[in-house]
Image: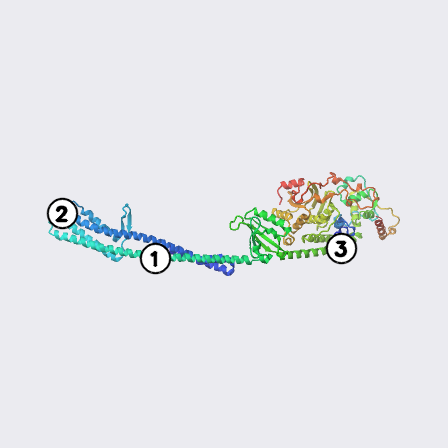
């Protein structure tokens, strides 16, 4: 019983040593990292708990043993005392039997032997409570007790031998008188020796019980001490850790704000003093939205309201917060809904100051924009010059060279104008007049490297609002470029168009190898939600970001689809608000002097607009909520029904 | 920044962004031999349905040439590069949409007015328009 706990202790301390070595290894790698506080706590308390367990086990064990011993000792005393009575009964039984009275000395002899045997060699005796149960008694160990008991047994043997002789011989025996005397003497001796034994046993028992009590008191004291030490250590470690975290919170440049469910500030970390010049106590109980820039307030409220409805969800937003001196600080916030956590019961906002980054971004974006604007001016002048040269050129070979220059400059202009869009500065060339849609498509084709592979067919006689013309041209150019570069040089890329219920769809189809489902999804995601300008540079699908941003400026929707017979189709939905009828557009008639030509009528062969379709601009249109473009044509129906061909 | 850019130099968006090389797919050499500035062009009657599949410039030229017009005049009226006009007219002639007439020779080729003179005439025509 006492071996096993100590073995456990050995095993436990061995594990602990291994663990401690492991931790000190980590500790060497990241020295004094404050977040490791809890690990240090665990190491410090590691030895206390096994010690406590051992102490408690020892106390319980000793208690059990003491109780067993006490019960045994009482039995032994009882047994020894009973033996005296048994000896006297035997003596009387023998004398009575010799005198011819009814008695059973044989039985008494057995009864006399038994207690001594049990006390000396161990065995079981009937419990003194008399409920029939038997109690085990261990053999006596103490040598003094054993000597007395041996003497006892010896005397009993002697007594029984004398008794037997008396029973055999009876009164007629010559030694009768001597034997009776001897019997009485032996009985008296036995009584005395038994008394001695009982006294010895009692003394032994008392000594052992008092020893047990002393040990128990000592163990109990040890346990109390260990528990006290554990408590103190825990308290100190807890306080240390709390101080560490408090210092982390206080000295962090980030703000930690807890918003109550009603939107007021329930807790504000002290770092707000540095960031916003305000004291945490002043902010507690005020609404966060009071600090938010009026332009951002709506978005912030939407984000927080949405978050408040989703327990344990996380959201992030950027906004401007007002410093006490009236200036605005750009911040980014990560918020977690912990309303379900009763210890917090609110939204936890981790707010970081990004004013410098915002300024840096702005200056990079301004720089980008300025450079692009300058390049744009130069490219425009270059194109004007090329125009002049082309106009006067009659030699086919030299015109060919000029065309190549023209093409390069046109592509350069497209890049430069895309850069202006990406810079995020919303300054665009405003062409007041509307432009024939077909011209926009052809302009897009002119901006593509491999323009001779592009086939434009069946674009309706519509016009596009002037302010969107360049952006749409660049957007289409990006998609056509994608189509030509990812299809075989021997195949054509087809650009066609058709009216839909809420606008006009341009479709760019290639016969390329197609895109994987993952790439297509990724591209469509980028088209739907383009990243900010400074993130695009690192993106793999930069072209689609550009398209997405160009499209977003005018409420245009762009989507890529698999064509079931191979390749990819890009669908561009131009909202009806951007479109106009081309019938009376001056650009659709050749620029001839009035009166020279008989009538403009023959110049408009009307076969492509036989249906006389007009954009239904009077429909209430919401470009962003428009459904996915679907012309309902064979190609689309097949593309939707068919498996992507990879 | 650019309120005035729209009308800068009287250019429209299309002239600015639609490049001449796309009209002919980058070709500068006429498919038809013997196309000169003074070559006269006339549209063949009964080709209206054939026009539907053509580009805008082709259709304009076909419409304009219901009466006989010279290549130089087409170029000037449509404000189209001469090199491009020649390619388109050559294509139309090959497809049988137009027929070409050489103007009656007034003498030996050496007696023809020099190109400079023709360009000056062209310039004058532009001024009239």
Task: Select label 3 or label 1 by which is in front.
Answer: 1
Q: Tell me residue A396's x, y (percent).
A: 78, 51
Which label is found at residue A381? 3
Label 3: which secondary element: helix
Q: Secondary structure at mark 1?
A: helix
Along the viewing direction, whichever of A477 and B74 lies nearer the viewer: A477
Dot 3: few (<14), some (14–19), or many (≥20) neighbours within 10 Å?
A: few
Q: Horizontal placement of B78 versus A38: left or right?
A: right
Nearest to viewer (mark 2 / mark 3): 2
A389 to the left or right of A518: right
Image vertical order of residue A90 relative to residue A612, above or below: below
Q: Earlier in the sequence, mark 2 or mark 3?
A: 2
For residue A532, side relative to residue B101 (left or right): left
Q: Quadrant of residue B50?
A: top right
Residue at the spot of label 2: A99
Circles 2 and 3: CB distance less than 8 Å? no
* Tag 1 subunit: A
Determine crowd level at label 1: few under 14, some 14-19, many 20+ residues with C-alpha closer than 10 A.
some
Residue toward you, A219 or B81: A219
Q: Work out whether mark 2 precedes mark 1 in sequence or the reverse, and give the earlier one.
A: 2
Q: Which residue is mark 1?
A: A215
For residue A507, what is the image quadrant?
top right
Nearer to the camera, A346 or A503 = A346
Question: Where is B117 relative to A628, above or below?
Answer: below
Outermost residue toward the top in this view: A611
Rendering coords of residue B108 (x, y %)? 88, 50
Say which quarter of the image contains residue B59.
Answer: top right
């Amino acid at each position: 019983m006492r071996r096993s706990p100590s073995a456990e202790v050995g095993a436990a301390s061995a594990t602990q040593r291994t663990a401690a070595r492991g931790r000190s290894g980590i500790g060497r790698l990241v020295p004094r990292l404050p977040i490791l506080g809890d690990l240090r706590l665990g190491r410090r308390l590691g030895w206390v708990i096994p010690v406590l367990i051992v102490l408690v086990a020892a106390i319980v064990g000793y208690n059990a043993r003491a109780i067993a011993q006490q019960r045994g000792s009482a039995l032994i005393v009882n047994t020894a005392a009973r033996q005296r009575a048994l000896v006297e009964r035997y003596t009387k039984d023998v004398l009575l039997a010799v005198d011819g009275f009814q008695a059973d000395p044989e039985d008494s002899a057995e009864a006399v032997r038994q207690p001594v045997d049990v006390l000396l060699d161990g065995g079981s005796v009937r419990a003194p409570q008399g409920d029939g149960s038997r109690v085990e008694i261990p053999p006596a160990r103490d040598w003094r007790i054993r000597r007395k008991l041996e003497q006892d047994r010896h005397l009993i043997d002697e007594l029984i031998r004398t008794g037997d002789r008396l029973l055999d011989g009876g009164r007629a025996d010559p030694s009768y008188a001597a034997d009776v005397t001897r019997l009485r003497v032996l009985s008296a001796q036995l009584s005395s020796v038994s008394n001695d034994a009982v006294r010895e046993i009692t003394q032994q028992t008392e000594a052992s019980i008092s020893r047990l009590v002393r040990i128990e008191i000592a163990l109990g004291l040890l346990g109390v001490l260990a528990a006290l030490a554990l408590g103190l250590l825990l308290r100190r470690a807890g306080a240390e850790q709390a101080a560490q975290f408090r210092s982390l919170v206080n000295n962090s440049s980030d703000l930690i704000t807890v918003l109550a469910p009603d939107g007021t500030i329930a807790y504000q970390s002290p770092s707000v003093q540095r960031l916003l010049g305000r004291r945490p106590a002043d902010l507690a109980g005020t609404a966060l939205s009071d600090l938010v820039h009026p332009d951002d307030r709506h978005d912030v409220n939407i984000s927080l309201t949405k978050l408040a409805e989703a327990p344990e969800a996380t959201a992030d937003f950027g906004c401007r917060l007002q410093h006490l001196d009236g200036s605005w600080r750009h911040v980014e916030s990560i918020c977690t809904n912990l309303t379900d956590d009763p210890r917090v019961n609110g939204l936890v906002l981790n707010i970081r100051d990004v004013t410098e980054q915002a300024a840096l971004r702005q200056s990079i974006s301004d720089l980008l924009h300025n450079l692009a604007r300058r390049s744009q001016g130069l490219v425009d002048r270059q194109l004007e010059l090329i125009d002049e040269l082309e106009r006067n050129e009659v030699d086919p070979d030299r015109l060919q060279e000029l065309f190549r220059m023209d093409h390069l400059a046109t592509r350069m202009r497209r890049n430069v104008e895309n850069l202006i869009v990406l810079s995020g500065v919303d300054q665009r060339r405003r062409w007041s007049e509307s432009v024939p849609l077909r011209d926009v498509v052809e302009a897009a084709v002119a901006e593509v490297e491999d323009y001779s592979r592009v086939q434009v067919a069946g674009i309706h006689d519509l016009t596009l609002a002037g302010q969107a013309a360049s952006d749409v041209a660049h957007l289409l150019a990006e998609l056509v470029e994608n189509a030509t570069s990812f299809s075989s040089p021997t195949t054509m890329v087809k650009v066609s168009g058709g009216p839909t219920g809420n606008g006009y769809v341009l479709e760019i189809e290639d016969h390329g190898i197609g895109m994987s489902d993952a790439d297509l999804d990724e591209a469509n995601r980028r088209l739907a939600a383009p990243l900010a300008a400074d993130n695009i540079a690192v993106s793999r699908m930069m072209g689609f970001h550009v398209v997405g941003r160009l499209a977003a400026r005018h409420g245009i929707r762009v989507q890529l689809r698999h064509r079931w017979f191979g390749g990819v189709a890009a669908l561009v939905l131009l909202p009806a608000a951007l479109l106009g009828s081309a019938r009376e557009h001056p650009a659709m008639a050749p620029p001839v002097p009035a009166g020279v030509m008989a009538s403009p009528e023959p110049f408009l062969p009307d076969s492509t607009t036989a249906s006389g379709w007009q954009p239904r601009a009077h429909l209430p249109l919401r470009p962003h909520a428009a459904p996915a473009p679907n012309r309902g044509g064979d190609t689309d129906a097949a593309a939707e029904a068919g498996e992507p061909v990879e | 920044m650019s309120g005035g850019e729209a009308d800068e130099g009287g250019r429209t968006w299309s002239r600015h962004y639609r490049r001449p090389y796309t009209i002919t797919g980058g070709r500068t050499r006429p498919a038809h031999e013997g196309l000169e500035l003074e070559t006269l062009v006339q549209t063949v009657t009964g080709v209206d349905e054939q026009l539907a599949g053509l580009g805008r410039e082709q259709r304009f030229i076909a419409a304009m040439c219901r009466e006989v017009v010279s290549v130089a005049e087409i170029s000037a009226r449509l404000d189209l590069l001469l090199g491009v006009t020649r390619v388109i007219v050559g294509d139309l002639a090959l497809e049988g949409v137009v027929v070409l007439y050489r103007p009656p020779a007034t003498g030996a080729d050496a007696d023809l007015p020099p190109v400079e003179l023709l360009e000056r005439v062209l310039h004058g025509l532009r001024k009239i328009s």
